Amino acid sequence: MLDATIIPFELPLPQVLPTIEGNVDYRLLREQLLRIDALLLHSGLETRLMEKDLARWMGQRKKAGAKVQQNRQRHCRRALRCNLARLLLAEDYRGFAARLADSPLLQWFCGLSELPCIRVPSKSTLERYDKGWPQADLRPVVHELLRQGAVAAPKLFLPEAVDLASAFLDTTCLSANIHYPVDWVLLRDATRTLIKAVQLIRGQGLKHRMEAPQTFLTRINRLCIQMTHASRHSDRRRQRKKTLRQMDRLVGTVRHHARRYRDLLQAQWPQTDWTQAQARQVLRRMDGVLEQLPQARQQARQRILQERPVANGDKILSLYEPDVQVIVRKKAGAEVEFGNTLFLAENPQGLILDWQLFQESAPADSALLPWSVGRMEAAYGPQLKAPAGDRGFDSEVNRVGLTMEGIYNALCPRSPQLLRQRSGSWKFKRLQRRRGQTEARISIIKNVSLEGRVRSKGFPHRALTVTWTVLVHNLWVLARMQQRAQAARTKAMAA
């Protein structure tokens, strides 16, 4: 990657923010954005991300003039701040685009307050902003922000240095944005996707002889209703098998028609009003379903007609998200979850030090500890002194490894006898008591920042969204540290 040098450019003249009285939530949001803006500038985080984007952009061009480069830098700065603000407010692309157009505060933070006309990015532009930086560029920036907070807290106006000595580890399931994976529902999904694609192709004037496409959707919906109500019959097993055979025959017919239309579009797409990229998008959508449909039909036959289980590794959980795993955690209300395992390590101040989203089935928690310790040492140096986790992270190998590294072992032992012995240490009890708050941190990441599930499509985009979320979360925590210190000083002065 080529070296990139930022050319100084003039920021747009911002509008004066209105003074809002009587709304404490707005005041807190304004203070948070002001503090995050200061963190971006004084930490150099914004500049480093602009340099990484600029180097990648210049590597794709033979030559770029100064004015063109400055425009790219402005665009990059706007993209970064739009991503941060959108994730901080937990908005989707469409909702944030509307909110951005209506809020002078957000326009100021995102660098859109230009006179006399304010141009707000559309939802499609916001989606491109979200995927503008690869995860490999974002992760080092998060580590650098925390390192600066540890060694140069006054530079970031932090009341105390970031603690890199203690880490509290836990894992969770990050649910995928899919419905409950029922076998016969996969057949309905395949039918709907293929028929809708056929309708698009027919709308462009490419036609083969077939029944009206809408009739296939009506039939599959009717059969789904029959399958749902089959459990009410006394001979429910026979009714389910009968209905599945009808669904299977219908899906076979739909597959035959979809293949004909797919080949027709590939051969004659220049006759349509679509561009080649649009035609390829429809073809990819159809190919993704057609390739998995034989396995999905066999899976439904095996589980419902033959009444034989299918191994988790061979199951299709979603036709659209192939990297979803079956995660058996036996939690209250969620014994089995469908998604990807997310590993998090936080420090006592609530900052995320290490994280990883697993594409395949994750190893046992005890195997994750050495990897996490190694990543944190590579990112922050030999700062870690005491990792704490539940008994899932404990093993003989981990106990010996931490002792050899000179790191205090605050993992909860599996052995009751060893647990009683360790409970006599005040340091062990203090770290284990603090470890309980990590469950709340996981809930903040999952249920507040990510709204319960990641809506990004494809595992690479989900992993990228998690990294963006960690960056926004850490900026939010650092800004809150400043707010609490300011509130304490104001209270002391008033007393």
Image (cartoon, rainbow, N blue to C red):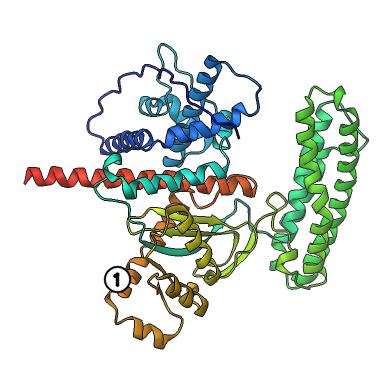
Q: In this image, 175 relative to 264: left or right?
A: left
Percent across and percent down for residue 68 are 55, 17
Please name the residue that numbered disc 1 is placed on. Answer: 430
In which quadrant of the rendered view does residue 308 lie? bottom right
Q: Residue furthest bottom?
A: 417
Percent across and percent down for residue 274 are 78, 25
Q: In this image, 169 relative to 275: left or right?
A: left
Residue found 42% across the figure and 45% down from its top: 144
Identify the amino acid type marked 1: Arg
In which quadrant of the rendered view does residue 104 lie? top left
Percent across and percent down for residue 139 are 50, 46
The residue nearer to you, when weighing 68 against 402, is: 402
In which quadrant of the rendered view does residue 325 lie? bottom right
Considering only vertical position in the picture, is 118 above or below 467?
Answer: above
Element marked by disc 1: helix
Residue found 83% across the figure and 24% down from its top: 272
Percent across and percent down for residue 51 are 50, 31
- Residue 218 in sight in this render: no
Q: Residues within 10 Å of mark 1 (few under 14, many from 20)?
A: few
Q: Residue furthest left?
A: 495
The residue nearer to you, when weighing 362 against 2, is: 2
Considering only vertical position in the picture, is 135 above or below 335?
Answer: above
